[in-house]
Image (spheres, rainbow, N blue to C red):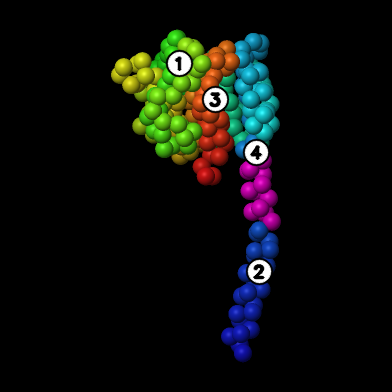
């Protein structure tokens, strides 16, 4: 009889704990999911192809808020699921502010990626007249299910890249014309890995070639790779 009573008490206690914790856990999960659909886009004051990016993200169901590079602070990103750094930004205006960001970051500006320690100092560049890139890790989510040679543009365009990302980076795509296979057009760092300076990356950080003004040339596969970069970053290790 005593054993039955003890089991009943334990059962009631577990039920109470579950009743108390489940709503909180559910609420937190819902909040995280909601935040994952919020993008803070950093851009320059005027011009660029940023309206294309914003329109595209909104069609995918993201809430997008843009901020001019000179006005950006890490505090303004609180509550967002991902920060997108447009290629249009003046890197000097944001410097290394994003290096320690608790919010995942997708860089389209390779100089800003260098400032954040994803690649070495001045280890970046841009090629013109490029139409395809080479997928080197087709199994990673950042590859968007694509493999081998992928046409990202309908015609030749600009492709920017980083040279020799750190050992903690996963390399997804390279510029085929580089010959030495060192021009990495898409790469990412998982949360908790080390960047080029051996610093711990606080949240997922991605670099993807997306030169401003080239957006109208993108193929469906080009957009798929962009979508995968935003989605993977926003998940921040949750999946």
Q: Secondary structure at mark 4?
A: helix
Choose between 125 and 142: the one closer to the eye: 142
Which residue is found at the position 68% from the left and 50% from the top?
Answer: 27
Which image quadrant for residue 5? Answer: bottom right
**CA separation in Å, label 2 and label 1:** 60 Å
Choose between 227 and 145: the one closer to the eye: 145
* Residue 235 is one of the magenta-drawn residues: no
- Quadrant location of the N terminus in the rendered image: bottom right
Mark whose residue sits in front, 1 or 4: 1
Q: Earlier in the sequence, mark 4 or mark 3?
A: 4
- Few, some or many residues within 10 Å of mark 2 (<14, 14–19, 20+): few
Identify the residue under disc 2.
15
* Residue 27 is one of the magenta-drawn residues: yes
Q: Are marks 4 and 3 in contact (CB under 8 Å)?
A: no
Q: Secondary structure at mark 2?
A: helix
**CA separation in Å, label 3 and label 2:** 50 Å
**Is residue 166 positioned above or below 5 on the image?**
above
**CA separation in Å, label 2 and label 4:** 30 Å
What is the magenta range? 23-34
**CA separation in Å, label 3 and label 1:** 13 Å
Identify the residue under disc 3.
220
Q: Position of residue 37 (x, y in %)?
A: 64, 36
Identify the residue under disc 1.
131
Q: Earlier in the sequence, mark 1 or mark 4?
A: 4
Q: Position of residue 224 (x, y in %)?
A: 53, 29
């Amino acid at each position: 009889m005593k054993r039955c009573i003890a089991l009943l008490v334990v059962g009631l206690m577990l039920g109470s704990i579950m009743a108390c914790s489940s709503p909180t856990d559910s609420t937190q999960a819902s909040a995280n999911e909601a935040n994952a659909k919020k993008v803070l886009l950093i851009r320059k004051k005027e011009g660029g192809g940023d309206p294309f990016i914003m329109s595209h993200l909104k069609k995918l169901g993201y809430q997008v808020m843009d901020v001019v590079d000179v006005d950006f602070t890490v505090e303004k990103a609180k509550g967002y699921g991902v920060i997108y750094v447009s290629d249009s930004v003046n890197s000097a205006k944001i410097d290394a502010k994003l290096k320690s960001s608790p919010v995942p970051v997708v860089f389209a500006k390779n100089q800003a990626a260098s400032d954040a320690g994803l690649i070495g100092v001045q280890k970046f560049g841009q090629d013109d007249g490029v139409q395809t890139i080479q997928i080197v890790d087709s199994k990673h989510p950042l590859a968007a299910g694509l493999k081998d040679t992928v046409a990202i543009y309908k015609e030749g365009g600009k492709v920017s890249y980083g040279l020799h990302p750190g050992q903690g980076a996963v390399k997804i795509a390279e510029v085929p014309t580089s010959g030495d296979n060192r021009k990495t057009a898409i790469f990412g760092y998982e949360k908790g890995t080390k960047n080029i300076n051996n610093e711990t990356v606080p949240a997922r950080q991605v670099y993807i070639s997306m030169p401003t003004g080239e957006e109208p040339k993108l193929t469906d596969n080009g957009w798929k790779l962009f979508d995968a970069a935003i989605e993977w970053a926003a998940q921040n290790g949750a999946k």
